[in-house]
Amino acid sequence: MNFAERMSRLGTESAFEVLARARALERQGKEIIHLEIGEPDFDTPAHIRDAAKRALDSGATHYGPAAGLPEVREAIAKDVGTTRNIPVTPEEIVVTPGAKPIMYFIITALVNPGDEVIYPNPGFPIYESVINFVGGVPVPIPLREESGFGFDLSVLERKASERTKLIIINSPQNPTGGVLELDQLGRIAEVAKRYRIPVLSDEIYKAFLYDGEFASITRFPGMEDLVIILDGFSKAYAMTGWRLGYGVMPPALAEHVTRLMVNSNSCTASFTQLAGIAALQGDQTPVAAMVAEFKRRRDLVVSGLNQLPGVSCRSPRGAFYVFPNVKGLKRPSAEIAETLLSEAGVAVLGGTAFGQYGEGYLRLSYANSEANLRKALAQMRPVCARLAGA
Ligand SMILES: Cc1ncc(COP(=O)(O)O)c(C=O)c1O
């Protein structure tokens, strides 16, 4: 079989590959602690599960409108309007199976071959993968440890031009846990307005902020018709397997994205969408409890990592990942990750799974039990000591 040339340009998300390798080791009888995959270890709150059951029993099992059920778009518009303090109408919302399709659809709808796209590096690998897939030119902006893994704004200001057709930002960020400060968001907004560049703002981790208030780039005047928000239910409501997300965008772009939905998924599952209303409008205490628990785990993991030979780790302000510096282990980060999996039984990701500027770092998800996190740190110690030559 001959494969289309474009398939050679499509990347992947290594977390799923490492998960598959870890599962294969488990089948051979090895015990593995999973710190590679980015999903809360909590169950979806009961009132959301109950709403889905009620929806199924009342017949929400059919096709629905491609852009989402009207009542769901309305509930999302209301929630986004409240959380970002901006006016939002249902015509600006497109509901998708998970938030990930929004990346694919927005890049497909806005980027022609040869167009430049600015995005964070290290960053979520799907951005770069889809930019390459559509024939765009990836323009990575390094996120540096010294500046708390914020955008290197001098690089952004130098690289942005009439050729830039999209800027992608992500705060709180995967994989570093970094958060863009208000002044950084303001400078990005200035660049976007100068060249009229749309900004895809990936806000999927907005609930996972451990100090300060969440700030969206939507707050800056003049950004109303330039921002596309990507958000969803996977992380905040522990609903990764439900596949429910959405984009908020100018209505003209929403029409194109809806057509992409018609051409790919037809629609998002109706009972899943109705459970989404319960998530947005129901009790928010499970979210707060989960975030409080993650903050405790973050502190535990950061402190434990800083005690390992050859490893240093900043305390990230958001998401549920840490991105420790492992340059003291004197090996490429992918090799360190491999050694930790095979020798320590701990699955983590090498920083280069998130782009070239991730070299020298690992990504660990602390969405795992405190007992497992302690065990993982203990099992990592002898391996780090050997690699560091300590
Ligand atoms: C930065 C970022 N954006 C978007 C997503 C996609 O979320 P979903 O599972 O809703 O497709 C993820 C998932 O890991 C993510 O890390």
Image (cartoon, grey):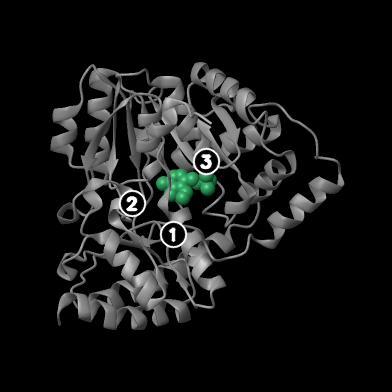
Left or right: 303, with 367 as reference point: left
In the rendered view, tell whether residue 51 sits above or below residue 325. Answer: above
Residue 276 at x, y percent in the picture = 65, 45
| Residue 190 versus residue 289 in the image, above or below | above
Q: Is mark 3 within 8 Å of ligand 1?
A: yes
Crowd rating for badge 3 (residues with CA inside 10 Å; few <14, some 14–19, many 20+): many
Is residue 205 in sight in this rendering? no
Q: Which mark is residue 99?
A: 3
**Figure quadrant of residue 294:** bottom left
Gap in angstroms between the C-alphas marked 1 and 2: 10 Å
Q: Residue at x 42, y 44 (%)?
A: 12
Is residue 34 left or right of 129 when viewed as pictured? Answer: right
Camera-side residue of 16 and 149: 16
* Residue closer to the observer: 118 or 354: 354
* For marks 1 and 2 on the same chain, the one whose residue lies earlier in the sequence: 1
Give, as a three-letter code, the residue at label 1: Val
86 relative position to 328: left or right? right
Who comes first in sequence, dot 3 or dot 2? 3
Amino acid type indicated by mark 2: Ala
Quickly name the residue at label 2.
Answer: 353
Q: Quadrant of the C terminus?
A: bottom left
List the residue tagged with mark 1: 18
Q: Is mark 2 within 8 Å of ligand 1?
A: no
Cα distance between the residues tagged 1 and 3: 22 Å
